[in-house]
Amino acid sequence: MMTQMKWLTIALAMILTAGTPLVREQNVSKKGDRKIMGTHRRTPNHLIHEKSPYLLQHAYNPVEWYPSGEVALRRARKENKVIFLSIGYSTCHWCHVMEEESFENEVIAALLNENFICIKVDREERPDLDHIYMAAVQAMTGSGGWPLNVFLTPDLKPFAGGTYFPPEDTPWGRIGMKTLLTRIASLWHEEPERIVKNAETLTQAIRNSQEKGSAGEISVALSEHAYEVIKKVMMTSMEDSVRPPNFPKG
């Protein structure tokens, strides 16, 4: 646990001090850069003017995707909603699987659109963000890969995440997107102070360690507090006794 929390300390420290914001100017490209087959009946989301082939692949998802930028962040702060950050790349197999299973699923899209501000990032465009949030997810779950899916407070502090999630809970204990989204939305609505307090405590611990000139160590009590939040969000009823398999990267 202490090793994992060290990684989370480093990840959050980078967010606080490295000057790498989740903001950039949105790229504008000509429409028609990529023909989206079978999606002509849908209204495109906010990715439609992006240059990245990966982002354009998601431009007609029913999910209301935003590119990374001030527009999405301003809305998250204004509406006090959790940010769902999803990072992938165009040749990632499991990214395409999750798109087909979850991001094209109308029920899951409705859960995302109602309760979250959804941001899609191409890791080949923003390797800096990929590096930061990969470290955070590895600290929280012990593994990483793509697609990388992270839940953030409106001020960009990660509190839950993972890689591939199936649409439904699996027999071996891997939580599904429907359950995960419902659980996080409920926790944010009922106990937002718990998530915020955890994020603030982690942030303060990082700042204190930086003042000493090193990442330092976070107390065992703090580690356990952070773990309890993650456990409540991420674990299914079966997961305490049955560990899900590790999905391959990419």
Image (cartoon, grey):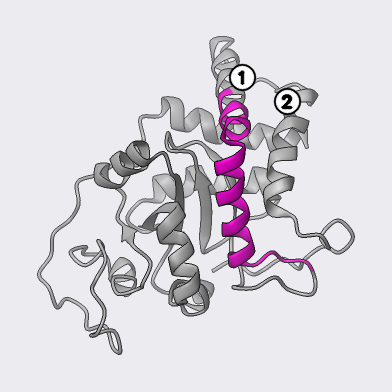
Q: Residue furthest bottom?
A: 38
- Location of residue 23 in the rendering, given as x and y in whole percent from the top left corner: 29, 41
Asked where in the image residue 165 lies, by quadrant, the reply is: bottom right
At mark 2, the secondary structure is helix
Is residue 116 in sight in this rendering?
yes
Front-lying residue, 242 or 19: 242
- Which residue is rendered at x = 61% and y = 22% of the image? 201
Magenta-highlighted stretch: main secondary structure? Answer: helix
Q: For mark 1, what is the residue? A: 205
Question: Would you say the residues marked 2 and 1 are in contact, meaning their CB atoms lie under 8 Å apart?
Answer: yes
- Which residue is rendered at x = 21% and y = 79% of the image? 34
Q: CA distance from mark 2 to mark 1?
A: 9 Å
Q: Along the horizontal axis of the image, is 172 left or right of 212?
A: right
Is residue 174 within the magenta segment? yes
Q: From the image, which quarter does the N terminus lie in?
A: top right
Asked where in the image residue 67 lies, by quadrant, the reply is: bottom left
- Which residue is rendered at x = 21% and y = 64% of the image? 51
Is residue 139 within the magenta segment? no
Q: For mark 2, what is the residue? A: 222
- Location of residue 20 in the rendering, given as x and y in whole percent from the top left corner: 36, 35
Q: From the image, which quarter does the C terminus lie in?
A: bottom right
* Residue 169 to residue 25: above or below: below
Q: Residue furthest front?
A: 190
- Location of residue 3 in the rendering, given as x and y in whole percent from the top left corner: 74, 36
Magenta region, residue range: 173-200
- Location of residue 50 in the rendering, given as x and y in whole percent from the top left corner: 21, 62
Q: Along the horizontal axis of the image, is 106 left or right of 226?
A: left
Q: Residue furthest right?
A: 241
> For the residue marked with disc 2, what is the amino acid?
Leu
Q: Along the horizontal axis of the image, is 97 left or right of 176?
A: left
Is residue 99 in sight in this rendering?
no
